[in-house]
Structure formats: structure tokens, C-alpha cells
Image (cartoon, rainbow, N blue to C red):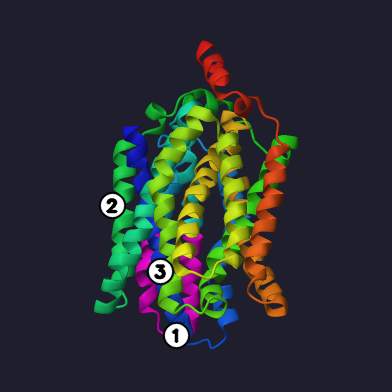
Amino acid sequence: MRKTWLLGFGFFSISITWALYNAFVPYFLERYISSVALIGFFMTIDNYFALFLQPWIGSRSDRTHTRFGRRMPYLLIGMPLGALFTAIIPFHNGMATLILFMVLMNLAMSLYRSPTVSLMPDITEENRRTKANGIINFMGGLGSILAFGAGSLLYKAHPSLPFIAAACITLVSLFILKAFIQEKRDAPGFQAQTEAQAKVSFRSQINRTTVLLLAAIFFWFVAYQGVETLFTLYGKNEMGLTESQASFSLTFFSLAFVVFAIPSGWLGGKFGKKRMILIGVSGLFVVFALVPWVESLLLLRVLLTMGGLFWACININSYPFIVSTGSENSIGTRTGMYYLVSSLAAISSPPLLGKLIDGMGYSILFYCAAGSMLLALICVLMIRHPETENPVQSRTASASL
């Protein structure tokens, strides 16, 4: 697991960069744009790149063969470019250059995000991937918390400092990954996979299990993205909370997720990924259904804490689950599929739920989120996959091959 912790620096840098980007770039846009809806559109550029570019990059990395490995070339190109364009965002001299720097930064990040994620299953045996995913998500969560804490202090000192710090962390993380992660040495079966060089298409990966799992991923991200984006408005306008009370309440969800990330991965490895996802989806369905009935701030934060625990059960186990339903030479392709559906949810959920709120009031937010979780639960219950039905038996069978 030592290499998993080292790989976690890649997720650490990505999480810090996105957290700072989402926190402070809207302030830059606000100088030129008065429409909040338009600001929101520009802030979703990353999801549009994830929708089209990341699936292609992930699939192409499956077929890449260089002396650096399959995934590392994309990191060696994307991370320095991402660091450069992140650092220069605050030095724009108008709206046109700001948008240009944002697009270039998002483009560079899209070059290496899927390959970075794909490195985890590449260098990790299948029965250890949920634990590994817990570790790297724990590192990513720490990055987000650090970004919100230290980033605010740096921004007060000078608006450019958080972005320069994120760029430096990205470069240091690249050095760590390049120095300690060697695909030819660390990825089991690397030579056999790269020598085959078989093209893995999205169509070849589509089967009943994959379709149901991708549908479930879409529905639970519709719920999660909608709540994450609109919760502060819900707290302010529906519950009468102050802006600081509403935003601080989300910290309970995030901290619970980070704390339970590693235990969730361990439990997924022991009892099965599908079982943990079912617990998470069922629990989050109940949490979302109860929130509209809550009037106490304390009880709201208790529910959000429980929600963070259940979200860890879902999020930590879902990516290893989608990878486990395909072959080892389709990891990058399946990573792209994962980001495709999660990005579709991120793009469609906030405006759709916002439209419903405009017509029916803020309480509809959590009812819709609960309904979306229920649809995800139905999809997961319909999945039949041998690895998930009896994880102990599956690991024994794998060990005997």
C-alpha cells in the first residue's frame, strides 16, 4: 500500500487545484459578468471537457506504449501545463484572457485526470482496489480541506497566491509520481497488456451489468451534485440559516466522508463492493428524504454527517466496481465511462433541480434527490455480477489461478 499513498499525491494535487479554482475563480468572473447563471456556465467548463475529452484520453491511454508506461506520458505533459495555466489565471488582463486561461487550464487537467485515476487499478491487485481507492480519496479529501483552510489565508494576502501554491504542489506531486511509480515495474501484466495493443472500444464494454451500473452512477451523482450545488441556497431560503451557517454545515458532510474513506474501502474489500454501495445508497436515500422535515440546525448537521458516511460507502466502492466488471486492458476506457456519466449528471442536475425549485419551492430539492437515490438503488439491486455476490469466494478463486 506504500505506492498507493504515493499515488495519492496525484489526487491530492488535483483536489487542491479544483477546490481553489471553484472557490476563487467566480470572484474573477464577477468583475466582468453580472449574471450568476452565466458565471455558473463558465464554471462548468471542466464538466464539458470531462464529457468529451476524458473518455477519449482514458481509452487512448489503454493503447499507449512508451518507455514511461501507458499513463505516465499523459501526466508528464498534462501536469506541467495544468500547473502553468493554473498559476497565470489571476494575472488575466480582461474577460477574454480570463476565459482563455480557464479553458487552457481545464484542457490541461483533462489530459491527465483519467490516466491518473487509471494508475490506481493498474498498480493494485483487484481484491485490494477498494482499500486503495479509500486511501487516494482520503488524500484527495485532505487536499480539499487544506485548500479551503490555507487557500483563504493566501487569497487575503494576494489573490494570486493560492493559484501559485496549487501550481507548485502539482509540480511536486508530479516529481513524486515520476520518481516512485514505475508502470513497467509496478503494474502487474504491464508487458502483456501493452504488447497486445488491442483497441478497446466503448461499444465492446457495453453489457447489462455495465449499463445498470452506469445508470446507478448517473442517478446518485444527480442527487449528490444537485444537493452540493444548491444546499447553501436551501439552507438560507428554506431553513432561514445565515450564509455562513449553511456553508459551514456542508463541512460536516465532507469531514465525515474523509474520515470514513479508508474504512469504507476496507469494508468493501471484505464484504463486497455491491453490498457497501447498497448500504450507502439506501442510507443516503433516507437522509435526503428526512432533511425537508428537519428544522433544527443541530439535527441537520447530524444528518449531513451520516450522509457523508453513506456517501463514502458509495463513492469509494463505485469506481473499483466499474473497473472490476471489465477486463484489465479496459481500465482507461472504463475510467472514461465513469467520468462520462458523472459529468452528465454534474451538467444536468443543478439547472434541472433549480428549475424545479423555481416552480415548486426549495423543499423539492431533497425530495428529488431522494427520488434519484431510489432509482440508483433499483439499478444496483438489478445488477448480477459474480465478484460482488460472493467476494470471499471470488478472491479465493482468483488466488488459485
Whether residue 401 is situated above or below residue 206 in the rendered picture: above
Q: Nearer the viewer, mark 2 or mark 3?
A: 3
Task: Report the front residue among 216 and 93.
Answer: 216
Whether residue 66 appears in this view of the structure is: no
Task: Tell which residue pokes out farthest to the top in this image.
Answer: 400
Q: Which mark is residue 73?
A: none
Task: Tell which residue pokes out farthest to the left in this image.
Answer: 157
* Crowd class of label 2 (few under 14; some 14 to 19; many from 20; radius 10 Å): some
Which x, y percent locates residue 112? 47, 50
Q: Nearer the viewer, mark 1 or mark 2?
A: 2
Q: Quadrant of residue 199?
A: top right
Whether residue 101 is in magenta: the answer is: yes
User: Along the polypeptide, which appears first: circle 2 or circle 3?
Assistant: 2
What span is in magenta?
81-108
Position of 370 with respect to 195 (left or right) is right
Q: Which mark is residue 172?
A: 2
Residue type (three-letter) at the residue carrying disc 3: Phe
Position of 208 with respect to 8 (left or right) is right
Q: For the residue labelled by badge 2, is the local secondary structure a helix, a strand or a loop?
A: helix
Residue type (three-letter) at the residue carrying disc 2: Val
